[in-house]
Structures are given as structure tokens and as C-alpha cells.
Amino acid sequence: MVLDNLGSSLKDALKKLANSSKIDKEVIDDVVKDIQRALIQADVNVKLVMKLSNQIKNRALTEAPPAGMNSKEHVLRIVYTELVNIVGKATPIKLEPQTIMMVGLQGSGKTTTTAKLARYFARKGLKPAVICADTYRPGAYDQLSQLCTKLGVTFYGERDNKDAVSIVRNGLKEIAKYDIKIVDTAGRHALETDLIQEMKDIYGLTDFDHKFLVLDAAIGQQASEQAKTFNEAIGITGVVITKLDGTAKGGGALSAVSDTNTSIAFIGVGETPEDLERFDPDGFISRLLG
Ligand code: GDP
């Protein structure tokens, strides 16, 4: 299940609200404190937590409940909508021909997500092809080509070429007739200057419709720094948060999205190519609190 620990602590906080005999400033402060604790434990950054708490408190203390809603339901509603607000809107994805560049650190789930995305678009009736531009991680070529074979997706790669930029240049010509072109770039363990340069060079080859940053849900507080660097280099158009099926805290990745003013496009919820979901802010928060 998605973010189990965060979900259960938030549910406890809301239960407290539901069980209180009256709604006053004291109760609201107490519940907001519990919500803050839950979010901080889940690695959501303090700035974002403070913003959310202030919004909840201000609204809960100043807004009158709409007709037909008691004050308890109203405050619950405020908490819910403010949580939906911090995860933001989903990245719009058009079901039309497009070129997508995948970036992220090594191990984030970039290659797996590339295959998942190819499958996603294929199921929508579009013809995908992928290019392996990860010349850095041994095995990346085989991993992606095998995933593509299993899915019946066209794969382009040059096993012995170490020049990612030329591979992408050649590949884009080769797969020109496909609807969806996905380029899987190299990740590293940290953001090194040559990696950023390589990304920029690939970025310069064509007009990418999307540049997706893949972030592991377990990444924690350093997520924001990484997202900023990637965003400054190539302009991220959407984030894919992977491994949300695990025990990860997830808040670091969520904060990174908010800090860079980007949005979440998809979430990864397992290792197989089917385990990709379109991000749905309302559904995500309902599931967390459900
Ligand atoms: P890359 O180095 O970024 O290309 O990472 P990979 O795509 O090779 O993924 C690293 C590991 O994470 C692999 O073992 C994947 O199976 C696993 N993985 C990727 N996405 C998910 C996910 O959404 N959930 C789970 N549980 N595992 C994932």
C-alpha cells in the first residue's frame, strides 16, 4: 500500500478530530501538531509542513462551514483539500505522438519506468519505441532490451558505443516513424558535472515534449537538491515517483516536487511493467486516508 506509515499517522490525527466533543482552537492546534509530526516523520520538508499547517489553521478558524456541513466535517474537509493541494495537480499527459526523455539517479527506477511508460502508451493505442542512452550502467542495455522484447516494444541501442549523444541522434532517426519515442538516459550515484553535460547535450538534439525526472520514494531530504539541479539543467516537465508500493516514507520526493514547482505525472507501485499509475491527487490522498 502507498505510504502506509504516513497514512496511518494521518488517520490517527483525523480520528482524534472526529472523536473530539467540540471543535475549538485547542483541538485544531492539537490535530495540526499531529499532522505535522506525521508529515515530518515521512520526510516532508519543514517549510512545506509549516505552509500546510498555517493553511489548515487559518481556514479552520476563519471559514464558516457550508450549509449542511457541521464544523467537524468542515475541518476534516479542509485537512483533506489542503493535503491534496500540497501534492499538487497531476502533470497533463496528452495521448498523442511525443518524445520523452527520462532522467534520474542510478537505481531510481528509470529503466523500469521507461518500459512501463512504453506499455502505458501502447495500451492507449500509440506505437512506442525506446532508445537506451544509458552507456554508463553495465547491464542497462540488456535490461531495457529484454523488457522491450517481453512487451513487444521496439528497442534501439548500440551496445558498444559509449557516446550517448550519438546513440540518441542515430536512434531518433531510426525510430522516427513511431508515435512515442522514449529516451532512457544514464543515471549516476550522484550528480556529476559530466552527467549534467551529457543530459544537456541529449536535450539539445530534439524538441522533447516531456522530460521526466524519476525519483525513488525512499530518497528523503536530498530529493529537493537533486530535483533543482535536474530542473535547472533541462527543465523537468513531470516527476515519476517510484517504489511507492514499498515501505518508503515518500515525503522527500513529494517535497521536491513542490520545491521545484513541478508536478507528478505517474507513480510506480511495483516492479512489473503493469505497475505504473497515472498520478491522481484526490485518489492519492483518499487512499492515504482511506
Ligand atoms: P535505474 O538505475 O534508475 O534504471 O533503475 P532500475 O529501473 O534498474 O530500477 C532499480 C530497481 O528498482 C530494480 O530492481 C527495479 O525492479 C526496482 N523498481 C523500479 N520501480 C519500482 C517500483 O515502482 N516498485 C518497486 N517495488 N520496485 C521498483
Image (spheres, grey):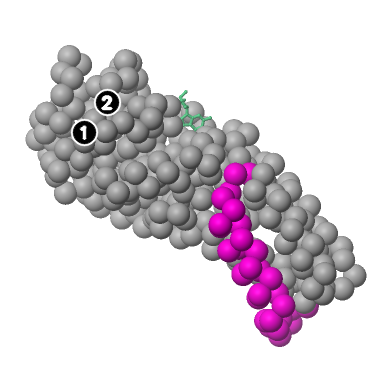
Left or right placement of residue 202 versus residue 277 in this view: left
Q: Is mark 1 within 8 Å of ligand 1?
A: no
Residue 149 visible in the shown view: no
Residue 140 tag number: none
Residue 170 visible in the shown view: yes
Instruction: Say what amino acid the circle numbered 1 marks.
Output: Glu
Q: Is residue 44 magenta?
A: yes
Between 193 and 215, the one lying in front of the other is 193
For residue 230, which quarter of the picture? top left
Q: Quadrant of the N terminus?
A: top right
User: Where is 222 relative to 28, above or below?
Assistant: above
User: Where is 211 relative to 34, above or below?
Assistant: above
Q: Residue at x 11, y 33 (%)?
A: 169
Q: Residue at x 56, y 42 (%)?
A: 250
Does dot 1 land on a helix, a strand or a loop?
helix
Instruction: Say what amino acid the circle numbered 2 marks.
Output: Asp
Q: Residues within 10 Å of mark 2 (few under 14, many from 20)?
A: many
User: Where is 47 relative to 178, above or below?
Assistant: below
Magenta stretch bounds = 42-70
Circle 1 residue:
198
Q: Where residue 90 appears, x then y in whole percent? A: 44, 56
Circle 2 residue:
134
Q: Where residue 77 appears, x then y in whole percent? A: 67, 69
Q: Earlier in the sequence, mark 1 or mark 2?
A: 2
Q: Is mark 2 within 8 Å of ligand 1?
A: yes
Left or right placement of residue 169 versus residue 26 in this view: left
Q: Is residue 83 magenta?
A: no
